[in-house]
Amino acid sequence: MSNLPPPPPPPVEPMVQLTNVSKVFGDVVAVSDVSFSVGPGVTALLGPNGAGKSTLFRMLCGLTPPSKGEVRVLGADARRDRQVRGRIGLVGQQDGLFDRLTAGEFVEIAAATHGMVDPARVAAESLAEVELDASDPKPVGQYSKGMRQRVKVAAGLVNDPEVLVLDEPLTGLDPVQRRHMIALFHRLGDEGRCVLVSSHVLDEVARIGSRVLVIAQGRLAATGDYRALRSLMDDRPHRIRVTADDPRALAARLIESGSAMAVRLESGSLVVDTTDVDHFGRVIAPVSRDAGIRISEVVPLDDDLESVFRYLVEGR
């Protein structure tokens, strides 16, 4: 018997691959020289509104051709290969529902469009995945924003897609619905599907998945896990607004404690620059209590998506 170790497993082929892809509409460059590849699991596409996320997704699904570069999904060009298009599920950002139809009727039409053998059964199963009832007689025009989003996701699942593309799918969902939807994305990813989810909200991306592609001004600004992207900001001060009944006295105490590198008054509130947010969070309460100062609000001013983009794209 040989004592040689078993051969390594073959490399996993990317399920989605973009190579130097650009998309131009007249004089507007919507996507500029983007390259990335993703495999099974959940990947978040993070970018502000207008960054080019929806255009990227439309190219992935074969709905519009790239002006330059190559888009491959499951090894083929979805725009030219009908079979590959049938293995992709798309949940677009636009509403696109027919308000007079019930959820069951709408999703059944989606299943029939994909040529499913039993559209009614498929529709019922897909709606159950998003915790909706296909027998509900209420038309979707009477549904809440969150329920309408879930109907759209159900319609994107009818063809049992290997690649699922979801453009801002969590908009309008309440916290419980959002948690259930993210759990569904992870379950689909764990089954070996490629799940691409776009969002412009950092907190959502932190919950959606660790793999993140950051799109800003049509370009791929950064890739990596969520914590790595946030750590890119650790070499510059974080800015926090503190509202208190004696902001001048609090400013002096914070400087003395070493938890603030700079402070200034703005509209009756204190704006604090700190390089250690965790330390600041630990000391702000005891410092104010010891000084007899009442704090009514502590709000981070640059712990948001736009700040991350300014840092990644503009270097500031």
Image: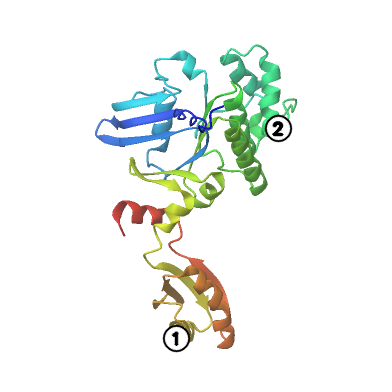
Between marks 2 and 1 in the image, the one whose residue lies nearer the viewer? 1
191 horizontally vs 54: left or right = right
Residue found 55% across the figure and 88% down from its top: 291
Q: Is residue 177 left or right of residue 45?
A: right
Q: Residue at x 68, y 13 (%)?
A: 118
Question: In the rendering, at what x and y percent does residue 265 appear?
Answer: 41, 78
Q: How many marks?
A: 2
Which of disc 1 and disc 2 is earlier in sequence? 2
Residue 87: x %, y % from top left = 52, 20
Q: Quadrant of residue 30?
A: top left
Quarter of the image with the N terminus in it: top right
Residue 98 seen by the camera: no
Q: Which residue is mark 2?
A: 132
Q: CA distance from mark 2 to mark 1?
A: 57 Å
Residue 126: x, y in percent? Answer: 66, 26
Camera-side residue: 297 or 230? 230
Neighbour tally class for label 2: few under 14, some 14-19, many 20 plus, Cα within 10 Å: some
Q: Taking 151 as reference, is 301 left or right?
A: left
Q: Quadrant of the C terminus?
A: bottom left
Between 170 and 245, the one lying in front of the other is 170
Instruction: Say whether residue 2 is visible.
Output: yes
The residue furthest left is 27
Q: Secondary structure at mark 1?
A: helix
Tell me whether circle 2 and circle 1 mark residues in contact (CB < 8 Å): no
Residue at 58% over, 81% down: 286
Q: Which mark is residue 256?
A: 1
Res 276 quadrant in image: bottom left
Front position in the image: 89 or 267: 89
Residue 33 image-quadrant placement: top left
Relative vertical location of residue 271 with respect to residue 69 in this rendering, above or below: below
Name the amino acid, label 1: Glu
Q: Residue 28 or 164: which is nearer the viewer?
A: 164
